[in-house]
Image (cartoon, rainbow, N blue to C red):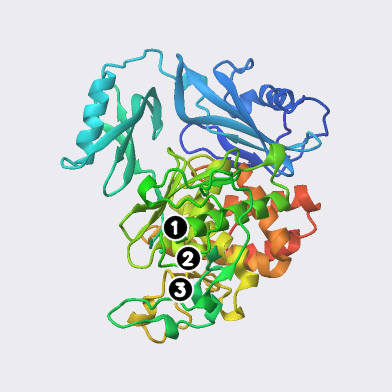
Amino acid sequence: MKPLREGSYNTVPGEHYGTPKELWGFRTRKRQAAPKTIAAGFLRANHELLGLTPDLRGVEFQKKVLSLGANHLIFQQIHDGRRIHRAYVSVHMDREGRIFLAKNRALPQHLLPTRADFRLNRAGAIKQAKKSARKKNLRVAVQDTEEMWFPKKGTIHPAWRVRLAYVKPKEEWIVYLSARTGRILSKRDNLCKAARGRALVFDPSPVTALDGHAALLGDHKRPRKPPPEAYRSVTLWGLKTNGRLEGTRVTTAPTNPKRRVRRTSRNFLLESTKKGFEEVMVYYHIDSAIRHLERLGFRGARAVFKEPVRVNVNGTTDDNSWYSPFERLLTFGTGDIDDAEDGETIIHELGHALQDAICPDFGQSKEAAAMGEGFGDYFAASLFADKKPERYRPCVMSWDGLLIGLQDPDADPPCLRRLDWDWTYDDFNPKHPEHFNGEIWSATLWDIRERLGRETADRIIVESHFQLDGFTTFARGARAILDADRHLNGGKNRSTLRRVFGQRKIGPI
């Protein structure tokens, strides 16, 4: 394979190493060979541009990810037997073997340390990590540790990664610290949290079923019991025969056994005041959402979820819900209105699990975190739009947000968030919460759906995630959607998509 010609591609420059972070805007010739072979040939041909050695020494093939329209080959950089944090190279090619994107986070060979100065042992690393969290009175468990290299602002540190799990309030911290000095290099809470935490089922909520919230607002800031017409009778598919809410796509097994429901008859006709209603809600809506993904083509070898999604239905008394990437577990809270009573809250949180299944540790930067929240809102709104009155379609979580109606009688319909704001990327503010910034991204995705329709929009938006990373940006997300449309639809929606991104002042670059 020949190297790329200068001027035949675009780059995203790297900040510290003098090598490009991304090569895009090109397409290599069609090739008939194993994707791994094609990718390795491309890296060898362009090793000088990417700062790699000619024989790709220290760059190990990690995995191949299949999406509907492309193959995505990921290589991890290893030095002195240890992984370099975020130092990967990925090559993305269509089904004909044409490479269209390469992402490069590898460190040039001449910058790698010649000496491994790992003075701090594992016990010392755990002690320093716990100390940094300053949570003396909370129960904590060490989930795992790893000795590694950690690049920071052009300097490569010998480091430890320590994962800590706190029980109440539920938190999962990833702490990176210098193995030479014990200094904290980075730390963050790894849970993907919702702003609020809330079959017979609500589909998605009593508010939308009744086309109004006034009848559901009680006195003393308590919701009234939903009437019979708020429910819908549905079929639960894929259940095991043990009478539990466990199936091929979702399982509630992590839920407290004392709170789980079991019906050997598999008759779960429960109202919201009965034990097990939230468990039924979670099972039905997650199973339905994954079936929708399968109808879009994400099944078999290209399936997003390789095993049943695990859910703890009543895992916290907080008014909050989250997805844990480490445990691969969805947890729903019971504060105020139970989160798992609102179908859109359930699907919003599933959106985090979906992104993590495609792109592990998605959402580690301000923009990526906002895109995570925005996608979750979009996924919920898109899934339920045809089941809701028209004025509710650009709103999400109107049952979970019911009490907003008590605080603001003019909020009609009440909801936690909307997808029809006219905000643009100019309104993005790193100081704002990710849920606020996320409404810019969800509105952009909603614009796409309004113009292309549900099936086309959902398919290209999900497909686009296969070429993103945990630190992605709105502009790269836009570019990935354009690429997905090219691979799946021959690019026939390109002008419409570029018009949407232009109106929202989002790249793509």
Q: CA distance from mark 3 to mark 1?
A: 25 Å
Can residue 324 be seen here? yes
- Location of residue 254 with respect to 422 vertically, above or below: above
- Give SS at disc 1: loop
Amino acid bearing label 1: Gly
Image quadrant holding the N terminus, namely top right
Q: Is residue 432 left or right of residue 362?
A: left
Amino acid bearing label 3: Cys
Q: Earlier in the sequence, mark 3 or mark 2?
A: 2
Q: CA distance from mark 3 to mark 2?
A: 11 Å
- Residue 42 percent coordinates (x, y): 70, 27
- Residue 19 percent coordinates (x, y): 55, 32
Can residue 428 be seen here? no
Q: Which of the two marks, 2 or 1, is nearer to us in this view?
A: 1
User: Label 1 crowding class (10 Å Cα cut-off): few <14, some 14-19, many 20+?
Assistant: many
Residue situated in front as seen by the camera: 71 or 220: 220
Amino acid bearing label 2: Asp
User: Label 3 crowding class (10 Å Cα cut-off): few <14, some 14-19, many 20+?
Assistant: many
According to the picture, the residue beneath numbered tag 3 turns out to be: 415
- Residue 336 percent coordinates (x, y): 33, 67
Q: Which of the two marks, 3 or 1, is nearer to us in this view?
A: 1
According to the picture, the residue beneath numbered tag 1 turns out to be: 276
Residue situated in front as seen by the camera: 125 or 402: 402
According to the picture, the residue beneath numbered tag 2 turns out to be: 342
Q: CA distance from mark 2 to mark 1?
A: 14 Å
- Location of residue 33 with respect to 279 vertically, above or below: above
Q: Is residue 251 left or right of residue 54?
A: left
- Residue 354 percent coordinates (x, y): 56, 48
Q: Residue at x 45, y 14 (%)?
A: 80
